[in-house]
Image (cartoon, rainbow, N blue to C red):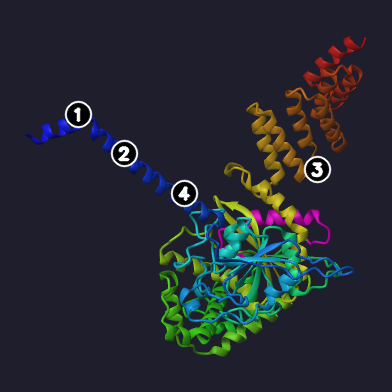
Amino acid sequence: MSLTSNIKNSVSNPKVWIVIGVTVAGVLILTAETRRRRLKGSRTIKEDYGAFIERFELIPFPQSPPPAAKQLLSGLTFAMDDVFDVKEYVTGFGSPDWKRTHEEAGKTAVVVTTLLKNGATCVGKTVIDELSFGITGENSHYGTPTNPAMPSNIPGGSSSGSAVAVAAELVDFAIGIDTIGGVRIPASFCGVLGFRPSHGLVSTIGVLPNSQSLDTVGIFARDPSILHHVGHVLLQLNPVEPRRTRRIIVADDLFQLSKVPQQKTVYIVSKVTEKLSGYQAPKHMNIGQYILSNVPSLKYFHDQTSNLQNGTYTVKALSSAMLLLQRYEFKTNHEEWVNTVKPKLGSNVSDSIHAVIKANHENIKAYYKVRTEMRAALRNLLKDDGILVVPTVADTSLKLNSKKTLLTEFLDRTSPLLSITTMSGCCQVAVPFGKHEDSLIGVSFIANHGSDKFLLDTVLDMYQSLQGQVSAVTSLPPSLDLNGNMEASELLKEKGNAAYKGKQFNKAITYYTEAIKLDESNATFYCNRAAAYLELGCFQQAEEDCTKAISLDKKNVKAYLRRGTARESVLYYKDALQDFKHALVLEPQNKAAKMAEKRLQKLVS
């Protein structure tokens, strides 16, 4: 019998069909189960965005009885980098080999204990770059936390998990380590606030060191008031301090090194400071030139081919000094362990760490001399009332698994911006500033070393107004982007006009309302909104808007015309007649006013 006939006979047999059916059903069930498990797994990852290495709970210290004040951080949850000691837990440093070769901590880090004493609850340790040596936030052993704002892009590091935990609303705040940008970079990429306090003011006892001369315990938060509270707790600040006038200084040259749009930034900061009391109008400076004149030891770090009088090369030299100091101290701290254990390092950090361990350092004293001179230079510039405005990083976040050449270029471009605060020891807050070219961007505010309360108070004071302006400007389409000194409120008005012409009257009202929020003294905004209200038959609202417009501008003909129309529509003929007569006084040849006057004279008589 042929193969074909065998198949035909088998297919015609009902028993064969039962076997096939059972088999297919089994395959379908198995596939469905596998798929269900995969979905379940992906949901598990999505729940915490891969932010945590280890989950546990450290409950806060009990609240002291009255008359003791309520714990400032009561009810708040936090996470921390895998660099903070917790009693009876092994601090892993983002490396399985480090965890394997170290004992449980005998004590909890001072900073963690301080947070627990003030009522906060810790929920776990978060992912970092291995040995806290990296700026991408990627970790080949524990996985890379997913950036909630841009899932296909890096979260930034080294404190990637902490930034992601805050951005994903898994915790109220988090603490990380900022050596050369470990808090500021991920804060910018994940769209949250990131605070690097003045160097040396927050205890690092019980924290694994990267580079002691640069390491600072930093804070992530979404809410500026929470950042303010946590900062006050960790820095043990006096809650009351005399209010000082604030000098805003924009580092123009640093914006030239960044994709953060300077014009937009200056506009937003200027509008906010205009409305708040106690702020001087922003001033501009070339910070590179200032550093060149005030940090003479940078001459040891200039590229031989660079123009020594160029401010850009000066901040690049400062960046070189920063990286050399970090690498020198990292080698001093960890060379013996790396050479003894020979850890299995991820490809993204392996080459860098081995290069650091093998490197030889000359003129080490110059590293520390630059640091001392930078501290003095920024103190003289900012004093106790200055705020320096800089872009947080140079570029928007890179795609996951980017080539090493791109990572190197990113570090080279961003390090000069980070080095200002890192090498001076000043305090800095990275603030979300909306999007540019569909990527999140951040702008930073820097204050003098020790002026942490002044800086935190400033950010708390400005934040709501800043975000309002950022939202208004960011929502504009590219065709209506800022042009010269044209105001965001004017641009919103133009969007309203476009919607009105397209007969989208509700949308037009929304745009005019947003414009009014930004500038309540502009009669045209009220007058234009009144026109949209008239189209929708909302005569009372239209009359109110026109009355407001007239109170702001007594010669606004359109406001009289539109109020007359609104009043006529609700049968207030005498009042309407007076409005049209007033319009004719201002504009005698206005045809619409003339026709309305005649019509209303008849109705009144």
Location of residue 229 with respect to 514 vertically, above or below: below
Q: Which residue is mark 4?
A: 39
> Where's residue 368, x and y in %?
60, 86
Q: Work out whether residue 257 can be spotted.
A: no
What residue span does the magenta drawing correspond to?
253-280
Identity, as a three-letter code, of the amino acid under mark 3 = Glu
Taking the image as shown, residue 312 lies to the left or right of residue 139, namely right
| Of labels 1 and 3, the one closer to you | 1
Q: Residue at x 76, y 24 (%)?
A: 534
Q: Nearer the viewer, residue 83 or 553?
A: 83
* The N terminus, quarter of image: top left
Q: Residue at x 79, y 22 (%)?
A: 590
Location of residue 220 with respect to 465 vertically, above or below: below
Q: CA distance from mark 1 to mark 2?
A: 17 Å
Q: Which residue is mark 3?
A: 520
Q: CA distance from mark 1 to mark 3?
A: 84 Å
Task: State yes or no: discs 4 and 1 in contact (Cβ < 8 Å).
Answer: no
Q: CA distance from mark 4 to mark 1?
A: 39 Å
* The C terminus, quarter of image: top right
Residue 456's image quarter? Answer: bottom right
Q: Residue at x 43, y 61 (%)?
A: 401
Q: CA distance from mark 4 to mark 3?
A: 51 Å
> Where's residue 220, x and y in %?
65, 64
